[in-house]
Image (spheres, helix red, strand yellow):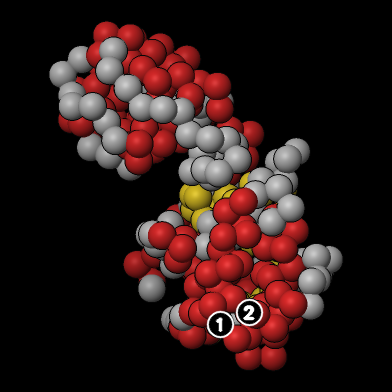
Amino acid sequence: MDRAELADFLRRRREALRPDDVGLPPGQRRRTSGLRREEVATLSGMSTDYYTRLEQERGPRPSEQMLAAIARGLRLTLDERDHLFRLAGHTAPARVSRAGHVSPPLMRVLDRLHDTPAQVMSNLGETLVQNRQAEALLGDETRHRGPARSAVYRWFTDPAEQRIYPEPDRPRHARFLVASLRAASATDRRAVELARLLTAKSAEFAKLWEAHEVAVPFERRKTIVHPSLGDIALDCQLLLTDDLAQLLLVFTATPGTEDAEKLQLLSVVGPELL
């Protein structure tokens, strides 16, 4: 671990960011160029003290999970992320087999969505980052670990996962999840491993997997069953990276409807409503 180079790299990347790059108001009386340390710490989901110690060459060697969080908070490109890992004495993650790094262009769009639910997901259905409104609508989907990080895995192994959709909508959504995993398996070995695991655990998944569907259209009009607000009819829009490895999912409601009012309530109250 090269503490001096790591500290210098973190400081320079922090100073290169502006508040509007990450969806923060510019504010007044900024004594330093770029973001403040506490802002980067918040964006990275860690304490200000921990991040500050890294910049001051005093902290312990950060784990891979911490480095991935810092890379996301600083909006690093893949090359910059790999450099960060190497400075900290870790091997840079393989770009195909690891989906913890969020595409910077998708993050820049997400940063600017303050009043509607949005989240970035991998091609395996892993929620990589959510805004506050998405967490209020769907719950904290980033908390899962292991195979359960994938919405596909949770759908076929946890009955509670399916309650977010009305019962008549569930069969089609199951087909879409399996078809998406099948498409991902052509380029991502992790999708093949996940399919093998699910085939052993779920007869329903095994049957759908055998159908070999890869072209079930995404349902852009969805009804989400919220535990406190009931049914919310939403339009869902997708923004994909060029390699189709990640997508930004944005939920909106028709203005002037009861559904729009419910979304507005989620924006005000946030995850506490759950």
Please report the residue visible at 70 percent of the width from the left and 83 percent of the height from the top.
Answer: 207
Would residue 160 appear left or right of 207 to someone viewing this image?
left
Residue 105 visible to an observer of this rendering: yes
Would residue 225 appear left or right of 237 to someone viewing this image?
left
Q: Where 239 falls versus 222 (above or below)?
A: above
In the rendered image, which residue does mark 2 sit on?
Answer: 205
Would residue 177 appear left or right of 265 to someone viewing this image?
right
Residue 272 picture location, percent across and down: 34, 67
In the rendered image, which residue does mark 1 sit on?
Answer: 202
Would residue 231 appear left or right of 144 to someone viewing this image?
right
Q: Where 26 falls versus 136 (above or below)?
A: above
Residue 246 picture location, percent across and down: 64, 47
Closest to the observer, 225 or 153: 153
The three-letter code of the residue at mark 2 reads: Phe
Q: CA distance from mark 1 to mark 2?
A: 5 Å
Please report the residue visible at 63 percent of the width from the left and 59 percent of the height from the top.
Answer: 192
Residue 144, disc: none
The quarter of the picture where residue 62 lies is top left
Q: Secondary structure at mark 2?
A: helix
Please report the residue visible at 36 percent of the width from the left and 17 percent of the height from the top.
Answer: 87
The three-letter code of the residue at mark 1 reads: Ser
Please report the residue visible at 49 percent of the width from the left and 85 percent of the height from the top.
Answer: 159
**Which quadrant is the C terminus positioned in?**
bottom left
Closest to the observer, 39 or 77: 77
The quarter of the picture where residue 36 lies is top left
Residue 101 picture location, percent across and down: 51, 38
Q: Residues within 10 Å of mark 1 (few under 14, many from 20)?
A: few
Circles 1 and 2, Cβ within 8 Å, touching? The answer is yes
Residue 152 picture location, percent across and down: 58, 69
